[in-house]
Amino acid sequence: MNHPSYLYLEERDYAGKDEAYDLNKRGRKEVWQKLEEYKDRGVIKSVGVSSYEVYHLIELFEYAKHRPVMNQFEYHPYYNRPTLVKFCERNGIFVQV
């Protein structure tokens, strides 16, 4: 039995703004645009991201046809993220921690 995918998370290991930042930025854009193609064709129902910071989301909004429905990231009493949570809430992005 083949079940459709309802959500696909774009997740990669991008660490900070180092010498590979432009390459990572281009990679995020290419992956996101391919996922949007799958969404437009009905292969997947929605697309989310994992471990995206506010600056990643702002960058994504510059070229995305579809905004992510969810951002999955680390959050706990010793590492709370009020700015990221508020940004996601204001932009209609479900937060999963």
Image (cartoon, rainbow, N blue to C red):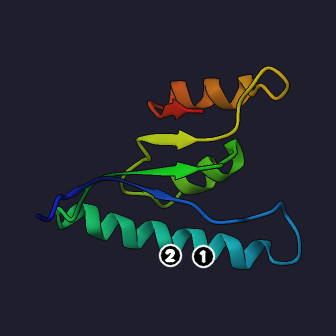
Q: Position of residue 90 (x, y in %)?
A: 53, 25
Residue that protrudes farthest toward the front in the picture = 1
User: In the rendered picture of this protein, how many numbered marks are placed on residues?
Assistant: 2
Horizontal side of residue 2 vs 16, given as left or right: left
Horizontal side of residue 60 vs 43, given as left or right: right
Q: Residues at badges 1 and 2 in contact (C-beta under 8 Å)?
A: yes
Amino acid beneath label 1: Gly
Q: Quadrant of the rendered structure where residue 27 is?
A: bottom right
Q: Residue at x 81, y 77 (%)?
A: 20
Q: Give the structural element (helix, strand or loop) at label 1.
A: helix
Q: Position of residue 51 (x, y in %)?
A: 65, 49
Q: Quadrant of the rendered structure where residue 84 is?
A: top right
Q: Give the structural element (helix, strand or loop) at label 2.
A: helix
Q: Residue at x 68, y 42 (%)?
A: 54
Which sits in the foreground, 63 or 40?
Answer: 40
Mark sitting on residue 72: none
Which sits in the foreground, 95 or 78?
Answer: 78
Q: Is residue 92 above or below residue 62?
A: above
What's the CA distance linking mark 1 and mark 2? 5 Å
Q: Is residue 51 above or below residue 15?
A: above
Q: Residue at x 21, y 65 (%)?
A: 43
Residue that protrudes farthest toward the right in the picture = 18
Q: Position of residue 74 (x, y in %)?
A: 70, 38
Amino acid beneath label 2: Glu
**Screen quadrant of the C terminus:** top right
Which sits in the foreground, 96 or 27?
Answer: 96
User: Local crowd at mark 2 within 10 Å, few (<14), some, or many (≥20)?
Assistant: few
Residue that protrudes farthest toward the left in the picture = 1
Q: Which residue is mark 2?
A: 30
Q: Which residue is mark 1?
A: 27
Q: Residue at x 37, y 57 (%)?
A: 65
Horizontal side of residue 89 vs 69, given as left or right: right
